[in-house]
Image (cartoon, rainbow, N blue to C red):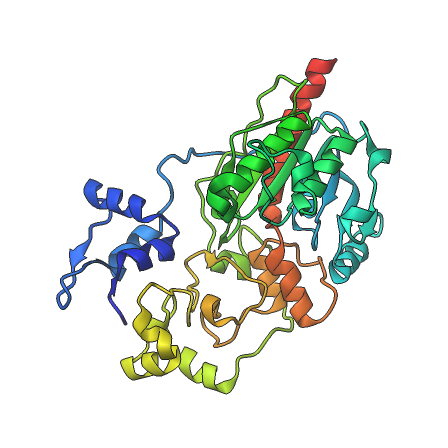
Amino acid sequence: MNEYMTLAETAEYIGKSKETLRRWDKEGKLTAVREPLSNYRVYRKSDIDTLFADFLDDDIQETTSNYVEPHNEYTVLELFAGAGGLAVGMEKAGLKCVALNEIDKWACQTLRNNRPNWNVLEGDIKSFSFSEYENKVDVVTGGFPCQAFSYAGKKLGLADARGTLFYEFARVVKEVNPPICIGENVRGLLSHENGKTLQGMMSILDEIGYNVVPVQVLKAINFNVPQKRERLILVGIRKDIDLKYEYPKPYKKIYNLKDALKKGDLFDSDVPKSEGSKYPKSKIDVLKLVPQKGYWRDLPLDIQKEFMGGSFHLGGGKTGIARRIGWDEPCLTLTCSPAQKQTERCHPEETRPFTVREYARIQTFPDDWKFEGSIAQQYKQIGNAVPVNLGKEVGYSIVKFLNSYYNLSK
């Protein structure tokens, strides 16, 4: 077992920045030591794991629940709906889905089969007009992909973003004119094109009549999701509304893989059996040697070299390679395919990738939410989704906002 980890590896392992680790070192919260051989500053894995149990931000308040009762029937129009992670979360928060747009045919099949009453608009968003929903919908949501814009002038206008999916999101918001709109994206949007992409999005929302709330990255583990996934949330409030939107408050309790797959607080039964990918024999032979919470550096040196090939000498953490998840930690972010070399997510006890239902549990989908298409299609739909419980907490924050808005407008 490799007992030391570098600064970069530690940062990746616990999902913190190197700056935070340096600060913790100064504060004596997690102290670095000198590695006997290289004299590098490293961390003892045992120290990290002890702290890992409560590695959360210090500023988390104890929150009983973000639950809010809707005062009216609030409606949501969802764009880029995928397999419904955000939509199911919104539904659980008491919002009614009036229509969902999605281009992937298998994801549409999933939405229709689970919710025959939902109006699923299948196809390219560019080919739909949403003007029938003008002033009839309370919130437009959508996880548009992050794409670069062409900058025409100093300030990016709606027309400059043509051809991007954010343009379509903004066009629909403009057509529908809801009190609030919510875009969600990967954390990487913050630094995409040195932040210009995000600034461009904000100036476009401003142009179509929406004030943007300061952007936040929400960590799924703080919202009853047993997975270290982060989503950037972009909230626009229509300019005629003078009301503050508040992000959902994080919870203190962190759920682990065990909570996802076994009967407990999150689910009232063990995970149902289901199909899943298999590893080739060569990979099983290697991964069998990796302990829980371990990764490629925990392999015998000769096997490390053989398994890693050329990248053995490249340095860097690569902590996702040959990674076996532990029962007592949240899962690392799920990807669209369960057995990619760079982002390995091996079951804690059995040497195999997570099954489809295990994947769905880690994303907090209910067990009765069935996915359509091939196994690969199902993994892709689940891996791309917003975790349901995170969607639900964002849903509560919207309900809270709309309650105040309709109270005022009375």
Quadrant assignment for the N terminus? bottom left
The vertical placement of 290 against 76, above or below, is below
Report the label total: 0
Residue at 65% in and 27% down: 207
Residue at 36% in and 48% down: 16
Please, which residue is most extreme toward the front here? Answer: 153
The vertical placement of 93 against 35, above or below, is above
Please, which residue is most extreme toward the right here? Answer: 132
State whether residue 298 appears in this view: no
State whether residue 344 appears in this view: yes
- Give the image location of residue 40, x and y in percent: 17, 60
Closest to the observer: 100 or 47?
A: 100
Closest to the observer: 329 or 129?
A: 129
- Give the image location of residue 169, x and y in percent: 70, 40
- Give the image location of residue 172, x and y in percent: 75, 37
As drawn, is 116 to the left or to the right of 292? right
Closest to the observer: 229 or 192?
A: 192
As drawn, is 132 to the left or to the right of 325? right
Quadrant assignment for the C terminus? top right
The vertical placement of 74 against 381, above or below, is above
Residue at 78% in and 52% down: 124
- Give the image location of residue 109, x and y in percent: 79, 60
Residue at 63% in and 65% down: 379
The vertical placement of 288 against 149, above or below, is below
